[in-house]
Image (cartoon, grey):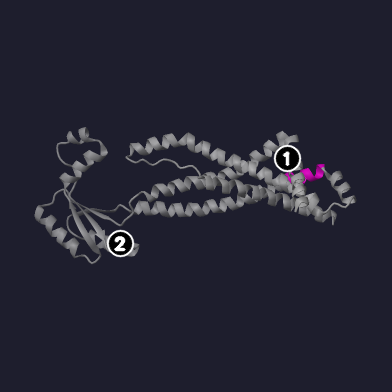
Amino acid sequence: MKGWLIAHGHACKRALRRLALQPTVTLLSVLVIGIAITLPLGLYVAFANVSAAASRIKTEPNVNVYLALIVTEQETKELERKLKSLSNVDRVTFVSRETALAEMKRVASMGDLLASLETNPLPHAFSIRPKASDPATLEILRAEIAILPKVENIAMDFEWAQKLNRFSTFAERIVLLLGLLLAAAVVFVTGNTIRLQILTQKDEIEVSQLIGATRRFIRRPFLYFGATQGLLAGLVAVLAVMIFIWWAGAEVHALTVSYGSDFSLQAPTLQQSLVVILLSGLLGWLGAFLSVWMYLRRVSIR
């Protein structure tokens, strides 16, 4: 066990020494790999924030029925009775035009502008909570309400939130696909870097072969080299995303506050950051392993 640890310690030192001896090449390789990792990580964080924002939005089924501007009290009561008699209606709430105007003045901060209007431009409305919320049933309910007298417009205010949720799910799959493609790119870039390292140390490898070096002995420093590159690239990607969150977070928060929300961008958690860094190291190790394996196979080192 002690000998195994010593062998790995020497291999790790050799890999770190090679990285230090080529600072420019190491920096460029780390930046290239880091940028490749930053793209899927940044998109994942962006869509995670979009999903978090969408989850704060009320998506319960609610149908708003707006009446014509000219409607009598008797016609309103008759319409309410008909709405309550529909099979898929659970609850009907009447919202008068006066109540709607007062609420708009409070929420929209346009009291002075609305106060200057000579007449109330808002119609009476009904807010309906349906029993079933599947799309087919809701379309039937919409059609039943549309044929009722004095109905001017029908709005299902949860539809856009549901579309946003579906878009978030679709975006997660796109990010996953992009992540897999860029992971393959990271393996390729690391493998190509290791291949160049092998070519520069070809004579050293041949001498090691002559004195009885095993595949593991020859391969071990390159594996540490690739894994270290991957770890550094993962760290670069995490730092880049955090810097962007810090840079854009204040403006996003100020924008959401202006719309009456306290939402702010969330950076990757410590656990997520560690997973990204370790996964990057694993990809670097895999690229190095494949590159060395193909070389050793070609030269038939035993």
Residue position marked by numbered label 1 in the rendering: 16
**Residue plotted at (53% across, 47% down):** 271
- Give 290 or 92, whichever is nearer the viewer: 290
* Identity of the residue drawn at 70% across and 38% down: 26
Query: Tag 1's secondary structure?
Result: helix
SS assignment at label 2: helix
Q: Amino acid at mark 2?
A: Leu
- Residue 65, relative to residue 104: is it above or below? below
> Alpha-carbon neighbours of circle 2 within 10 Å: few (<14), some, or many (≥20)?
some
Q: Residue furthest front?
A: 2
Residue nearest the observer in this picture, 268 or 185: 268
Rendered-image quadrant of the C terminus:
bottom right
Farthest right residue in view: 210
Q: Are marks 1 and 2 in contact (CB under 8 Å)?
A: no
* Alpha carbons under labels 1 and 2: distance apart: 64 Å
Neighbor class of circle 1 (other Cα within 10 Å; few <14, some 14-19, many 20+) is some
* Residue linked to disc 2: 138
Q: Earlier in the sequence, mark 1 or mark 2?
A: 1
Residue segment shown in magenta: 193-200
